[in-house]
Image: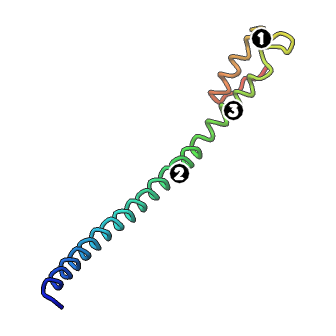
């Protein structure tokens, strides 16, 4: 093998080794990024379910208050809102506070 070809071959080998090192760094960075992205989404989903778990009693209370509103105040024939029974507002406030007034 001629010395000039040997020099070119050594240069190609050096460039291939540098390229291999860069490719390994890029792949390592991709793996780390993928791992952190997975951890990020696990944390987000965990907080979402945890938040729902802790807010569920309040959501059910709001739901019961909302169902308390249905059928009160407005009749099916007349779509306008009427305050014919003003006592129901106090009952809803008592439901929110957790005490129920008896009639």
Element assignment for label 1: loop
Mark 2 surroundings within 10 Å by alpha-carbon count, few (fewer than 14), some (14 through 19), many (20 or more)? few
Along the line of sight, the residue nearer the viewer: 37 or 20: 20
Q: Which of the 4 image quadrants contains residue 26? A: bottom left
Quadrant in which the N terminus appears: bottom left
Quadrant in which the C terminus appears: top right
Specify the farthest residue to the bottom: 1
Q: Position of residue 99 (x, y in %)?
A: 67, 28
**Which one is closest to the eye, mark 3 or mark 1?**
3
Q: Residue at x 18, y 81 (%)?
A: 10
Specify the farthest residue to the left: 3
Distance CA(mark 1)–CA(mark 2): 45 Å
Q: Identify the colour scheme used.
A: rainbow
Q: Residue at x 18, y 79 (%)?
A: 8
Q: Where residue 45 is drawn, which disc sits there?
A: 2
Q: Is 63 displayed left or right of 54 in the figure?
A: right
Q: Residue at x 22, y 73 (%)?
A: 15
Q: Upstream in the sequence, badge 3 or badge 1?
A: 3
Q: Upstream in the sequence, badge 2 or badge 3?
A: 2
Which residue matches tag 3? Answer: 63
Which residue matches tag 1? Answer: 85
Along the line of sight, the residue nearer the viewer: 82 or 30: 30
Q: Are marks 3 and 1 in contact (CB under 8 Å)?
A: no
Q: Is 13 displayed left or right of 30 in the figure?
A: left
Q: Position of residue 40 (x, y in %)?
A: 44, 54
Element assignment for label 2: helix
Q: Position of residue 13 (x, y in %)?
A: 23, 80
């Amino acid at each position: 093998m001629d010395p000039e070809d040997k020099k070119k071959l050594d240069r190609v080998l050096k460039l291939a080794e540098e390229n291999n090192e860069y490719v390994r760094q890029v792949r390592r960075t991709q793996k780390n990024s993928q791992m952190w992205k997975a951890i990020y989404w696990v944390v987000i989903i965990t907080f979402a379910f945890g938040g729902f778990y802790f807010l569920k009693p309040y959501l059910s209370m709001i739901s019961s208050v909302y169902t308390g509103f249905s059928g009160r105040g407005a009749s099916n024939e007349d779509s306008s809102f009427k305050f014919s029974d003003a006592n129901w507002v106090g009952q809803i406030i008592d439901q929110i506070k957790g005490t129920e007034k008896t009639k």
